[in-house]
Image: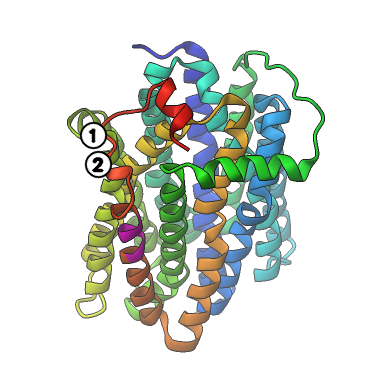
Amino acid sequence: MSLAGPFHRLAWSNLVAQSAEQLSIAAAPMVAVLALGAGAGETGFLTAAQTLPFLLLSFPAGVLADRLPRRGLMVSAELVRAAALLSLPVLAAFGWLSVPLLAIIGFVAATGTVAYSVAAPALVPALVPRASLAAANGRLELARSVAYAAGPALAGALVGWAGASPAFTLAAMLSGVAVVLLVGVPEPPRRAPAARHFGRELQEGAAFAWTHRFLRPIFLTAVFWNLSWFILQAAYVPYAVHVLGLSASAIGTSLAAYGVGMLVGALLAARLMRSLSIGMAIAMGPLVSVAAAAVMVATLWHPSPLLMGASFFLFGAGPILWTISQTTLRQTVTPDALLGRVSALFMTASAGARPIGAAIGGAVGAAAGPEAAILLAALGFMVQALVIIWSPVPRLARLPDRAERLTAA
């Protein structure tokens, strides 16, 4: 079934918004290490600040996404991010740039990212029929994969050749393009919800996901995966610079392998999902992540940019199938009135674990070296795989129909 024009505008907006995010996120630690002399502890702090809004603001943003027009919320979010990113070139021009200021501006920019990322998957079911959800989610993930592939490499090139200002200026311009594209997305009207207590709305969304026999293990797997991933991320740049001696351009290229893996995974996702059950498609990502972590650990004994690139490629290729399949299951089993809050809960799980993982990675890296943080991350990836394997999710043969959805909790 073909996807409608309004969805295509959303997909393009998602592509440039994700590109803005990846460009700025990749550029910030490179600027901190190469221009400001930051170490593992400071880059861990910076990464934690850039990701803290996902922990603090995802769920409140989900309530807003269920109360307000979702497209309008996304437009406002991108405008906030563009304004924050444009302040960085100004600071750099006056010589005022510092790690604390990078962290503060990263926090503000990520606030916009949170609202956009929560509202987007809640808007998709209003633009495409149920039968096309998997294809629509695959298209969005393909766009995200392109951003993950291009963003770090472009950030490395810009920071290495021209400094911080061009990277952050380009990211702000991309956010502006995302706003223009969103304006052309017609959101179907929704009945305004009755006025309710904010806390009760949060509790309702959390209770639905936590008591659902399929959603709860997916939530827990996402928590452990992201804790492990950001322990690794906090240690990676100092490890690559100080242990392997890589340049900004080489670091960007190795990180881009993650996006290339996502791109390959997204391109193959439709074929794989036709040959796998929905449950096994969901389980595939956590299992491939264990293999990716093992390859990264191997670089401790055999330092090699090729092995590091292979590890990031696997981290991108496997979990992309997880993202498409579990998002489709989540959109299928969740009532429309709860889509924003359930989407936000999973954003809290997946992205809210980032500052905690980054802080742990930074602390371990500062105390025992980045090698210890990489080993700790590998252990966490083993845990997340066990959580999903021991759940009923891998035995789910197909998407539930309406009757099954009503009794699945």
Of residues 94 and 48, the one nearer the viewer is 48
Q: Main secondary structure of the magenta part?
A: helix
Residue holding disc 1: 277
Rendered residue at 53%/55% (across/down): 25
Residue 233, position as x, y percentages in the image = 44, 65
Disc 2 on helix, strand or loop?
Answer: helix
Disc 1 on helix, strand or loop?
Answer: loop
CB atoms of marks 1 and 2 within 8 Å? yes
Rendered residue at 60%/67% (across/down): 46
Residue holding disc 2: 280
Name above or below for residue 254 compared with residue 6. below
Quadrant housing the N terminus: top left
Q: Residue furthest left?
A: 275
Rendered residue at 63%/50% (across/down): 110
Pointer 1: residues within 10 angstroms few (<14), some, or many (20+)?
some
- Between the residue at mark 1 and the residue at mark 2, the CA separation in whole angstroms equals 5 Å
Residue span colored magenta? 383-387
Name above or below for residue 230 compared with residue 178. below
Q: Is residue 113 among the parts visible in the rendering?
A: no
Q: Residue furthest bottom?
A: 367
Indicate left or right for 378 with 353 as reference: left
Residue 362, position as x, y percentages in the image = 51, 76
| Residue 384 is inside the magenta segment | yes
Residue 13, position as x, y percentages in the image = 54, 28
Pointer 2: residues within 10 angstroms few (<14), some, or many (20+)?
many
Q: Amino acid at mark 2?
A: Met
